[in-house]
Amino acid sequence: MLMIVFFCLGFKETSFIANRHLLSDTVPPIGSIIINNNAGYTNSILVNLDLSASDEGSGVDSMRFSNDSISWSPWEEYVPWKSWTLTSGDGLKTVYVQYRDTSGNLSIPYSDQIILDTAPPNISNVISPDTININDTLLLSLTVTENYSIKEVLVFYRGGGETNFSWGSAMFESGFWRYTLPYSSIKGFEYYIEAYDSAGNLSRKPETGCYSLRVRINDPGEWERNINDELVPLPSGTAQTNYRIVSFPLTRDNPSALDLFEKNLGEYEPSKWRVGQYKGEDNVYINEPGIGSIKPGEAFFVIVKDPNKVLLSGAGTTIRTDTIFKKELLVGWNMLGNPFPFQIPVSAITLDNGEDVTIYSYEGSWSIVNTLKPWKGYVIRVTSETYINIDPTIRVKTVKEDLDLGRYIKIIARCEDALDDYNFIGFSENSKDEWDRKDKFEPPLLGKYISLYFPHYDWDRYSGRYTTDIRKEGNQRFDFEVITEIVNDVRLNFEFNGIEKNTPVLVDRDNGDIIRFKEKDDYVYRNNGFPRHFSLILGDEGYIEREIKKAINIVELDVNPITFSTINIRYFIDVDGEIEISIYDCAGRKVERLLKNKVKRGEGYISGGNNLRAGVYFVRMSYFGKNITRKVLKVR
């Protein structure tokens, strides 16, 4: 570069400097181009170019690009990278770049190549059986075709009911890709296949979901096992708490329920073991017509006297784990078994009639559960004929068995070995005094039972007996009843959660006892074979005192003390129940029964004694264990 200073005559000293490229620059730039970091394949026409150029003379000024070295893009300022669009259509692609320096010298075209591959591999000829024997391995065999290059073939697999997949790489042997799945358990296998080519294209088989393998179980069959892989025996004994509800998650070769239970428990003998089912509003036992067969979704209640008994399933096959299971339900109580050999969340269950799904389990006492376990049985109540749907693809993530009941009192009823410990009254935000989703039906009677329930036959929606009665905050009276066929002492225990112990008052409506929970939390009475009626009252003192007066049962019996022919009787009861009205002579002999039936609350009239001779008689009314007697004189 030459610096020239110009002097202008006639002026004072003035100068300026001009920089000009006066020396000759004839050497072109040199450079390079790399596509997608030197990858051999791409599945997109949009690529990234890494650019490098240098010039020892005037310096690199600009660059241009081409896909064919004929048609070029406009010149643009040189930078070391650029996004570029390839021509469409799979195949080998070449990208050219040319650099220009400040003096206008052009470099030779530099180029790089890459294969455009937008087509995924094709997976076909997947050779896999529908059923696998338990504890067998499975060799998968398949074909993968690809236009250019297969990078890898992966097999993703998991046991039935599991959330996470394991995976392994298939090997190419004798024209096929092969992979051996590990030993199968009764849960079976779910798997899918992915094939990748070198361009990153992915193919999946099946496109959604998984292949499902059913599991073949041979004699003597399978049964519930503990964490040590030991068979779990049924509880033994004749107490109600030894009942269990069981199911079998397979289609048995011999579907006879009697065959299965007799093979495991011996010839049917009701004194040694009993098996039955709830069928709507009826019970069916193992030796009666109508008992269900051994198949997925069926369940049975069972009690055994002798210890160490298990219920091996016998030979059969599990069902597919990728298909929704459906079963028809009758009005009332229905037995339900887990049809799959793994846990199912209740959130995976729906009813076609739109009712809420509430599942009851019996493990010595009734409870409401959020998870169906394999080999266990359950009951569900519906108010109209419908179908239940169980989706095995919805996995168990968290298990929470407790209902959110807010502030509550838990009531536990016991009589000898019979137990009912799932009963709640309480208050919760957004609850209603009539039915809402926190009000759950009382489970069915089982064995030598005791049952505590809240009667709501007056509700417009879902009337019946309830095991939970959750309402809005405020003054409330909760009526409940206790029934048992055991003639012995009944003990009621009360557990308080968020409700002060000295707040509620318990009224035994049949004998007038009033219990305030200050120093005790239980109440004992002698069962006489009739339902017992109670009220639990919470609120301010004025409300409690008024409701106590209303709660005590009122029973009235009026008879004209002197009659000439017919004995006319008026009675009144304030609670629905069974009453008996009979006439006795002076020796205490029953000479005529006038009424023995279930009667609605209110007033009633009855007459009799027309054929009795003159004399002194006694009219007795029995109602919930109470006996009321009136004397009457019959004259001619």
Image: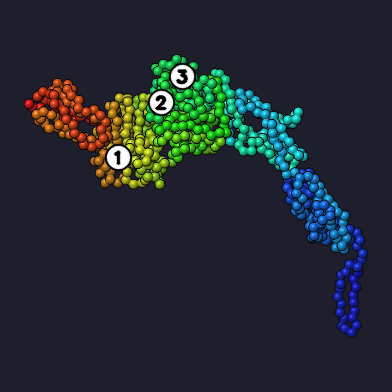
Alpha carbon of mark 1 to alpha carbon of mark 3: how far? Answer: 50 Å
- Label 2 SS: helix
Where is residue 34 drawn, in percent x and y?
80, 49
Left or right, residue 504 beside residue 613: right
Alpha carbon of mark 3 to alpha carbon of mark 2: how far? Answer: 23 Å
**Residue shown at the point (20%, 35%) measured from the top left:** 604
Q: Residues within 10 Å of mark 1 (few under 14, many from 20)?
A: many
Q: Tag 1: residue type?
A: Val
- Label 1 SS: strand
Residue position for label 2: 241
**Residue shown at the point (19%, 27%) measured from the top left:** 594
**Residue shown at the point (37%, 45%) measured from the top left:** 432
Q: Tag 2: residue type?
A: Thr
Q: Can residue 368 be seen in this view?
A: no
- Label 3 SS: helix
Q: Which of marks 3 and 2 is in front?
A: 3
- Mark 1 and mark 2 in contact? Answer it, CB < 8 Å: no
Q: Nearer the viewer, mark 1 or mark 2?
A: 2
Alpha carbon of mark 1 to alpha carbon of mark 2: how far? Answer: 30 Å
Q: Nearer the viewer, mark 1 or mark 3?
A: 3
Say which quarter of the image contains residue 222.
top right
Where is residue 208 drawn, in percent x and y?
62, 38
Where is residue 343 drawn, in percent x and y?
53, 32
Residue position for label 1: 505
Where is residue 569 drawn, in percent x and y?
16, 32
Q: Tag 3: residue type?
A: Leu
Quadrant in which the C terminus is drawn: top left
Residue position for label 3: 258
Residue lying farthest left? 636
Q: Can residue 336 be seen in this view?
A: yes
Q: Earlier in the sequence, mark 1 or mark 3?
A: 3
Left or right, residue 581 beside residue 48: left
